[in-house]
């Protein structure tokens, strides 16, 4: 996955209790990195730390609900101090479960936006305060292939939050160029994880392959990456070109 000569790093990963976040933490720990894992479901974080206790890396557990902005700032600062300085902050926490607008489920849609976008904004702010003061660091935003286009129905607000995150990543890359602070935006395709359960998509990338591709993109400090490349780069390209009439038929 990476060169054995690569020095260990210190990572913060939100949403690390399951799915992509948990698998990323697991793989980083087994290769020797230190990882601050954060999520609401503390028992899962503790189980992950116990599972990787014999790994060459170090896991620290941080209870966190990313919709609590004050907690986000406190926890990221705490993780930075505990691990002796964070090298990479992975803004990963997210949720699906959106609903068609106008169907009486405003509260569900609002909760998703607060997690995926407002929670991400808080993490970005907290991370960049640390990185700007230090003059170095690497911010990783986990967007989605779903942010490529505006998708109809229950996917509408989910795709909107991911498109916004991608736009923030691009803005920050332009702003921070030459500052010593890198920004990577990841666009995972359909990877087998809890958030994609029930999606009905005919193919999903195994989670190990998907997370390996995410870690490689982070290690290489790629500015923007659809991961893994196959088959999701061609699908990303097609999604940008397909007419709305075709999307309408496909997404009914």
Image (cartoon, rainbow, N blue to C red):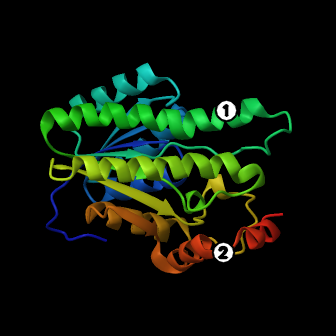
Quadrant assignment, res 245? bottom right
Q: Name the residue: 64% across, 48% down.
A: 158
Relative placement, left or right, of 12 versus 86 is right
Residue 87 seen from this side: yes
Who comes first in sequence, dot 2 or dot 1?
1
Q: Is residue 151 above or below residue 64?
A: below
Relative placement, left or right, of 152 versus 29 is right
Q: Quadrant of the C terminus?
A: bottom right
Q: Nearer the viewer, mark 2 or mark 1?
A: 2
Residue corresponding to mark 1? 110
Q: Name the residue: 26% across, 66% down.
A: 220
Can you give x and y, in whole percent of width and height, for residue 11 in the image?
Answer: 30, 46
Q: Name the residue: 50% across, 79% down.
A: 230
Counting labels gives 2
Q: Residues within 10 Å of mark 1 (few under 14, many from 20)?
A: few
Circle 1 — which element?
helix
Q: Residues within 10 Å of mark 2 (few under 14, many from 20)?
A: few
Can you give x and y, in whole percent of width and height, for residue 22 in the image?
Answer: 47, 50
Circle 2/circle 1 CB separation < 8 Å? no
Can you give x and y, in whole percent of width and height, for residue 37 in the image?
Answer: 40, 40
Q: Is residue 51 above or below residue 7?
A: above
Q: Is residue 92 above or below residue 69?
A: below
Question: Of residues 208 and 121, which is closer to you in this image?
Answer: 121
Residue corresponding to mark 2? 242
């Amino acid at each position: 996955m990476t060169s054995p000569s690569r020095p260990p790093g210190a990572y913060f990963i939100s949403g690390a209790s399951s799915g992509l976040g948990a698998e990323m933490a697991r793989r980083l720990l087994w290769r020797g990195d230190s990882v601050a894992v954060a999520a609401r479901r503390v028992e899962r974080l503790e189980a992950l730390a116990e599972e990787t206790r014999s790994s060459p890396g170090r896991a620290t557990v941080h209870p966190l609900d990313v919709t609590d902005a004050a907690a986000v700032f406190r926890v990221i600062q705490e993780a930075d101090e505990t691990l002796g300085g964070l090298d990479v902050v992975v803004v990963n926490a997210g949720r699906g479960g959106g609903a068609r607008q106008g169907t009486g489920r405003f509260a569900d849609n609002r909760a998703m936006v607060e997690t995926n976008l407002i929670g991400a904004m808080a993490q970005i702010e907290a991370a960049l305060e640390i990185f700007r003061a230090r003059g170095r660091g690497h911010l990783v935003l986990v967007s989605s292939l779903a942010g490529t286009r505006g998708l109809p129905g229950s996917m509408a607000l989910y795709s909107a939050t991911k498109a916004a995150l991608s736009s923030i990543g691009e803005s920050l890359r332009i702003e921070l160029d030459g500052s010593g602070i890198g920004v990577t935006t990841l666009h995972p395709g359909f990877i087998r994880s809890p958030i994609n359960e029930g999606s009905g998509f005919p193919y999903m990338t195994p989670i190990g392959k998907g997370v390996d591709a995410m870690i490689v993109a982070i290690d290489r400090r790629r500015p923007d990456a659809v991961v893994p490349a196959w088959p999701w780069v061609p699908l990303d390209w097609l999604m940008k070109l397909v007419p709305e009439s075709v999307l309408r038929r496909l997404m009914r």
